[in-house]
Image: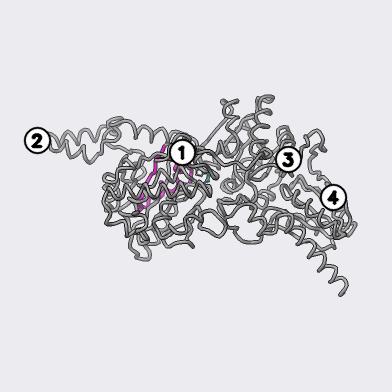
Amino acid sequence: MILEKINDPQDLETLSIEELQTLSQEIRDCIIRVVSRNGGHLASNLGIVELTLAVHRVFQSPRDQIVWDVGHQSYAHKIITGRKEQFPTIRTLGGISGFPKICESEHDTFNTGHSSTSISAAQGIAIAKEHLNRNGKVVAVIGDGALTGGMAFEALNFTGHQKNDVVVILNDNEMSISPNVGALSMYLHRLRLEPAYTTPKDYLAHVLKQIPGFGSRLYNVLSRIEGSLKYLLTPGMLFEEFGFKYFGPVNGYDFDTLERALIRARERKGPVLVHVLTSKGQGYQPAQEQCHKFHGIGPFEIETGKVKKAGDNPPSYTEVFGKVLCDLATKDKHIVAITAAMKEGTGLTRFAVEHPSRFYDVGIAEQHAVTMAAGMARGGLKPFVAIYSTFMQRAVDQVVHDVAMMNLPVVFCLDRAGLVGEDGPTHHGVFDITFLRMIPGLQFLSPRDEVELEMMLKYAAVAEGPVAIRYPRGNGVGSGESWHERKPIVKGRAEIVKEGSDVAVFAVGNSLFPALKACEQLENSGIKARVINPRFIKPFDRNVLAEVIRKRMPIVTIEEHALTGGFGSLVTEVAADLGNQSPILRIGIPDDFVEHGSQKELRALLKLDSEGIAARIQDWIGRKNNLRVAV
Ligand SMILES: Cc1ncc(C[n+]2csc(CCOP(=O)(O)OP(=O)(O)O)c2C)c(N)n1
């Protein structure tokens, strides 16, 4: 095994092309083996093995610094930068992360997880190197999907202006998670296919200038002619106009040409873009054939590529959202659905098939998605914007400035709200209550289960003004009830799920069920809890709280969200306004980033599962009573 001898990128230096090819296969096998057990981003990682090796042979990490955009494709990088022994622990609790982490290795230059940040980060590091007289190049490796993000363009624009030493490697596999979208992706596609676009300008100049007599003049004349000829002479014109020297396109599996292009990029001063062509899922047929499914995948059988399913579960929140929105759109032609490159993840695949003319995938462009939705609403449509809670962080200003201030009827469907598990801190959706609850006029709801999600979507479809709904990753609770059996959703009204007078427990969204279970356990200790499902984070039901305060009941709040500025903060603020004298216990996520691990493990660690909640309430009530006795 060649891999056995690779403990550091320097160990790659002496390998022959044949050895590099063998090593690539060994790395692929290792990635497939581990991801089949732990789950992870398979297709992207299989596509980029050779490019990773070539980058590490040409650039000297950590002196040269490599920034991986999104970072989901950094597995081969991790394996060859001293982490092959830990690689089997990837994405598991206490194991290495599925994304680059500066605390994990000196070879990880910048933490990533959210898309389109790499060129900005590389630019910043290059500026710092200049100021501090440090040697070394800065390399950003960015996918064609990530390049659709607005930040990437802002960075291209500024890098071209600043003209410092940044090498951008465009890993073009023509896929985001789904096929990539937009004019840029069509442009890259043309660069791939039309030989005229791929004739290197320098080479053409060289050939023309060798024609005796008039070759040089011919080149000069041709260079001055505007229009298509200019494009013929300048492949990658778009990037050249941004101030980059463009090299490519280069075959991402041919070490020889790949390394030659990277060496040219390394030797050049100023911004360079190397356009590399790769293919998602390379070397593993199931991932090649269904690369969107294998973009991010749970444990699977290597022989067949079949995902290992854990029995019959209730439908996921994502599935319920997709189905209900399709049905709503069938009845109401004003409804449109928008995703920012997350059709599958947000459950909009069926919508795209059933209502293709009302489905919009805007690429990785959350800010654009929100403001475009605002425009659609202003024009008379009813947009549903499906964005993961964590990616919504990108578009807060657009919600405030473009939607809420005009009170436009846009519905935000925040999937993956709460702890998402193995993807870790960049992906946990634990800040949305804080950043959305301060927005005037926005109705903000969270369902206790999948039945309530359906009810809330129906409510939102006819609501006036903006509405946001947050719901978790994973399966619903399967109560077996239908929405007909539930109390209807009324604006700003909570639901009392269980009566009791010893303590009032406000549990938001998916915290309601563990809270209910915890309160059943507390009954055995003689503590009778009133359990309240707030339904609305905003407008919050002050009456329910006022009654609890009147009765001087101790108050507990539970949320799968940061405590800072979250639901418990909200209840505490309102309670203070109402003259509360009772003690309040806030259960949620402390002021720290939560690492990766399964959702179950993380909930247990944070005492957000029913056992943890019961123990915390019992302990608190015990101490509170002791205090009373002491007083
Ligand atoms: C801001 C943001 N939105 C959405 C995502 C989800 N996401 C992760 S990878 C990815 C596709 C990236 O495509 P590309 O950059 O081409 O890399 P590839 O997987 O094709 O190698 C998306 C949409 C994200 N990480 N960040």
The residue where tag 2 is placed is 212
Q: Of the two numbered discs 4 and 2 on the same chain, state the one appearing first in sequence.
A: 2
Which residue is situated farthest in the left direction here?
213
Give how far across and how far down residue 390 sits, in percent.
Answer: 59, 48
Q: Position of residue 52 (x, y in %)?
A: 37, 50
Q: Amino acid at mark 2?
A: Pro
Element under label 3? loop
Q: Is residue 623 left or right of residue 160?
A: right
Look at 78% across and 35% down and name the residue there.
Answer: 483
Whole-number angstrom distance, CA of label 3 to CA of label 4:
27 Å
C-alpha gap between disc 1 and disc 3: 32 Å
CA neighbours of label 1 inside 10 A, class few (<14), some (14 to 19), many (20+) = many
Q: Say which mark, if any, is on residue 544.
A: 4
Verify CB contact (< 8 Å) between mark 1 and mark 4. Answer: no
Disc with the residue nearer the chain's start (2 vs 1): 2
Left or right side of 602 for 188: left
Q: Is residue 160 visible?
A: no
Classed neighbour count for the residue bearing mark 4: other residues with Cα under 10 Å, few (<14), some (14–19), many (≥20) = some
Marks 2 and 3, how far apart at CA: 81 Å
Of marks 1 and 4, which one's residue comes earlier in the chain? 1
Magenta-colored span:
146-173
Query: Residue drawn 49% across and 55% down?
Result: 88
**Residue mark closest to the camera, 1 vs 4:** 1
Q: Which mark is residue 287?
A: 1
Q: Position of residue 167 (x, y in %)?
A: 35, 51
* Label 4: which secondary element: helix
**Residue type pointed to by label 3:** Gly
User: In the depicted view, which residue is nearer to us: 46 or 630?
Assistant: 46
Q: Which residue is mark 3?
A: 478
The quarter of the picture where the N terminus appears is bottom left
The residue nearer to you, when weighing 251 against 67, is: 251
Determine whether, in the image, residue 407 is placed left or right of residue 295.
right
